[in-house]
Image (cartoon, coloured by chain):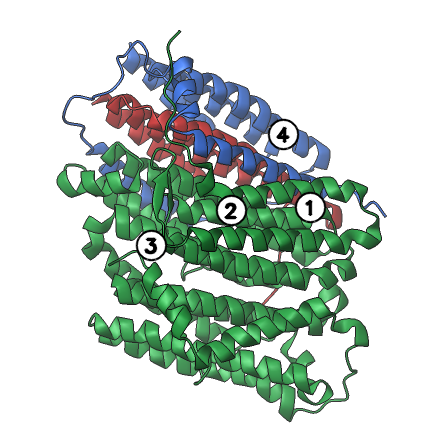
Chain colours: A blue, B red, C green
Amino acid sequence: MEMAIFLVMGALSVGFSLVMILARKPVTSAMSLVAVMFCLAVLFALQSAHLIAILQILVYAGAIMVLFLFVIMLLNLREKEGEESHTKGYGQIFGGAIAFTILIVAVGSTSMSGSPAGLSSDRFGTTAEVGKILFTKYILPFEITSVLLLAALVGAVALVKLRMR
Amino acid sequence: MMMNNYLMLSAALFVIGAVGVMIRRNVIVVMMCIELMLNAANLSFITFANYRHDMTGHAFVFMVIAVAAAEAAVGLAVVLAMFRNRETVDVDEMNSMKG
Amino acid sequence: MEMIPLPQISVGAIAPELTLVAAAMIILMLEVFTISKGRDNLAYVALAAVGVAGYLVIESLGSPMTTFSKMYVVDDFSGFIKLVCLLGAGMTILMSVKYTRDEGIDGGEYYSLLLFATTGMFFMVSGADLITIFLGLETMSISLYALAGYARGRLASNEASIKYFILGALSSAFMLYGMSMIYGAAGVTNLHEIARIIGQNKENIHLVMLGGGLVLIGFAFKISAVPFHMWTPDVYQGAPTPITAFMSAGPKAAAFAAFIRVFSDALISLQYQWWIIVWILAVLTMTVGNLIALSQENIKRMFAYSSIAHAGYILVGFTAGGKLGESAMLFYLLIYTFMNIGAFAIVAIVGQQGEERTSVSDFAGLGYRHPLLGLAMVALLFSLAGIPPTAGFWGKYYLFTAALDQGYVWLAILAALNSVIAVFYYLRVIVVMYMREEKGESLPQNAFPASIVVVILVAIYGSVLLGITPGGYLALAASSSLAH
């Protein structure tokens, strides 16, 4: 069962990500990326990362991609007639293929021996457990995230606010 | 092993994203490609977390989602600021400095 | 109800960071109530915060501790780098006062973003866990993307910001993917634990090597090592001059610190695999940086390539490693902060409003029209070129002898040759300043406010007087190295 879902979602996510990098219209790219994120959310849920799966949809597919779509709409981009939307990068694609081969060989030969220690499987990945570690072990990174978001907020406003004077 | 399948999918998405960054000229699509690369890394984290039964990966991904949101906000603001001065989102046209 | 045990939390350990964040928020709120004449005062609030944070960091020297479930470490190494970052931030704030007023970009956000970036650097250098390092790096980078584009009316600044953003985000993605592999192989993200586990268990060592390689690429981007330096010239040229000065000092020092921590702590068992890569990076970075700098007409661009070359010299110390190499790196990062920010302060003065005079030829006759300013520039350029007895010379001397000490004779020879090449383009500026007399107009009287004069005096102190008596700072650098 897991294998079947993986195959469907994996194929869909690779397909949609290819559509994303090849599509002429930015909107098509954005919608394909939303589809990829949904597929990944399913794969996260499949690996019992329940909270992360929900966040993937709420924050990534929801908030971040809406921001992208909003900016695309705001700029109202028109693709110029008869112009390529991407550079013909045979070199890049070749380099990508080499990198891909190296990565596949490396991660494909990864093995995980020894029994995994840790949480029992019915509590692993649940919202309660993620919440617990976020507020105990990972309290400092969690707080740094708040500084990060504030800095991003201030930076974004400073860059686009209209001149007051 | 099932774990390797997930990892290979993650590698595939990462490479597609990286190639996209290099071949696309529209800066907004380039940013989407970077988001895809971050997603690929997240899949890798979740997979390792699942097969080790260790929640560290989940905490890491949680933070990465926040980072991605912050990056998208600032990145799009930067694009918007540029667009006000010069109506382009084409990275090849951003060449006012030479050396 | 299940009780959740809290980990050890030491607020005192992050007191400097709390100070900076609090000041950043206070500045944001003060701005609302400040009339435009009083905007300069916001800079002094930021400067006071930098001072308080510096005091707190100095207080914490000599009493190492690890807290927040081993995510955060306070030691002399992080303390030293934090002081370098604060020095950079303080000098930048001072040189920004006049600049931001001239450009019409003065405002609370500018200073609060500078403080947020410095906070990010602090978390990065004190991070004992991949998560803390990554988040610190991102906090720093995101603030810097916004600051690089802060002169938003100027196209060059927009472009700088976009290029910095795209390549910075790309390098973060590489680093994150590499971290996921290291996590996968070790099962933990704590640096010490990673070192312990991969030292014992070689099962997935290929994954660690690949992950380490990706993390290395990420850091190489941040320190602008060749071939990952493509963004540097455009970003340095286009960003507002004080921000260029800021980027060339603190963020680079912080990236080097995290680089050292990850590679000489977590990945120490792979030392023999990565030293050759760093050796090649060091040679490429020095040589390419120096050779391209020779032909630059824009002075900010020339300093961009020269900063690439300086990153190469610091990588020489990294290759050498050990106590000697590390303390030489720390010392050089300190010296470099002084001399580079000082040089950029002079570039900002000469550039004037709108940064219209940033080509090398705009310096023609400067030595006659403004003898003191010319003399200051000569001193700083001598120090950057590494001419004795300046501090720049001693910095290079310690780096190269550290390499010789470890038997990297060729590396030391190539580095010395590179310093000779570098002399040419620094001298070229001096030649233009003194030999070519042009009827240029003098700088207006208001070009020299007290704030920027202080920056130049501090820079002169750091790059000349420190060269004559380097003892105390050198001892501090030696006692701050991670290796023993």
Q: Which numbered disc flags the more N-terminal residue, 2 or 1?
A: 2
Residue furthest to the right in view is A165
The chain letter under disc 4 is A
**A69 over C102 or under it: above or below:** above
Q: Which residue is mark 3?
A: C260
The chain letter under disc 3 is C
Asked whether the viewer can see residue C220, the reply is no
Gap between marks 1 and 3 measured at Cα: 32 Å
At horizontal 69% and vertical 44% (from top left) the residue drawn is: C27
> Answer yes or no: do the residues labelled 2 and 1 have beta carbons within 8 Å?
no
Q: Which numbered disc flags the more N-terminal residue, 3 or 2?
A: 2
Gap between marks 2 and 1 measured at Cα: 20 Å
Asked if badge 1 and badge 3 are on a common chain, one would say: yes
Tell me which corner region of the image, top left, top right, bottom left or bottom right, holds residue A42.
top left
C34 relative position to B92: left or right: right
Looking at numbered disc 1 in the image, what kind of residue is underneath it?
Glu
**Mark whose residue sits in front, 3 or 4:** 3
Q: Residues within 10 Å of mark 2 (few under 14, many from 20)?
A: many
Asked if badge 3 and badge 2 are on a common chain, one would say: yes
The chain letter under disc 1 is C
Asked if badge 3 and badge 4 are on a common chain, one would say: no
Q: Which residue is mark 2?
A: C16
- Residue at disc 1, secondary structure: helix
**Mark whose residue sits in front, 3 or 2:** 2
Q: Which residue is mark 1?
A: C109
- Residue at disc 3, secondary structure: helix
